[in-house]
Image (cartoon, helix red, strand yellow):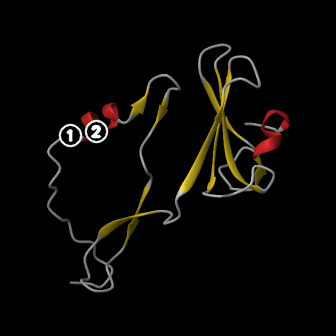
Amino acid sequence: MADNEIHQSKSYVSESEQEILKKSRDDKYNVSAVMPLGELAKSETTGTAYRTPVSKELLALRMDDSTTTDVIYLAHAKAGTATSAALWRIKKIDLTSGVVVSWSDGNTYFDNVYDNRASLSYS
């Protein structure tokens, strides 16, 4: 077999992907509450594919549903990050006419100040 070939491993999950996603949904805020995973081509020790978290850092979550009427701000940063540091990824959930989700600066980079969440540009 070629070195870049990915081997399929047997799944030991007793529930379907749809059942798992349904259980991991936060209906109040209309967001998915699952941890993103990345796929590595092969394990250095076994040569087979395995899944690993995209980030090994624990992320803090801040939520604000009172600054702006009908808007929820969800923000993530490395645990212990000051709210005044430009190290936050901020998502805006606008409920004024349905549910509209947007990101600060139009991206998911960890480069915004949480304290400025209401005045940032979202798309």
Please state if 78 lies on the left or on the right of 48 as rendered: right
Which image quarter is the N terminus in?
A: bottom left
Residue at image location 25% in from the left, 76% down from the top: 48
Please state if 70 lies on the left or on the right of 45 as rendered: right
Residue picked out by circle 2: 20
- Image coordinates of residue 101 in percent, x first then y, are 62, 31
Residue at image location 69% in from the left, 56% down from the top: 110
Q: Which image quadrant is residue 42 in?
A: bottom left
Residue 103's label in the rendered image is none
Q: Are marks 2 and 1 in contact (CB under 8 Å)?
A: yes
Q: Amino acid at mark 2?
A: Ile
- Image coordinates of residue 71 in percent, x first then y, are 69, 23
In this rendering, is residue 41 above or below 12?
below
Please state if 108 lies on the left or on the right of 84 as rendered: left
In this rendering, is residue 34 above or below 96?
below
In this rendering, is residue 84 above or below 47?
above
Of labels 2 and 1, the one closer to you = 2
Front one among 26 and 95: 26
- Image coordinates of residue 7 in percent, x first then y, are 22, 71
**What SS does tag 2 mark?**
helix
Count the labels in the image: 2
Please state if 15 lies on the left or on the right of 111 as rendered: left
Q: Which image quadrant is residue 26 in?
A: top left
Residue picked out by circle 1: 16
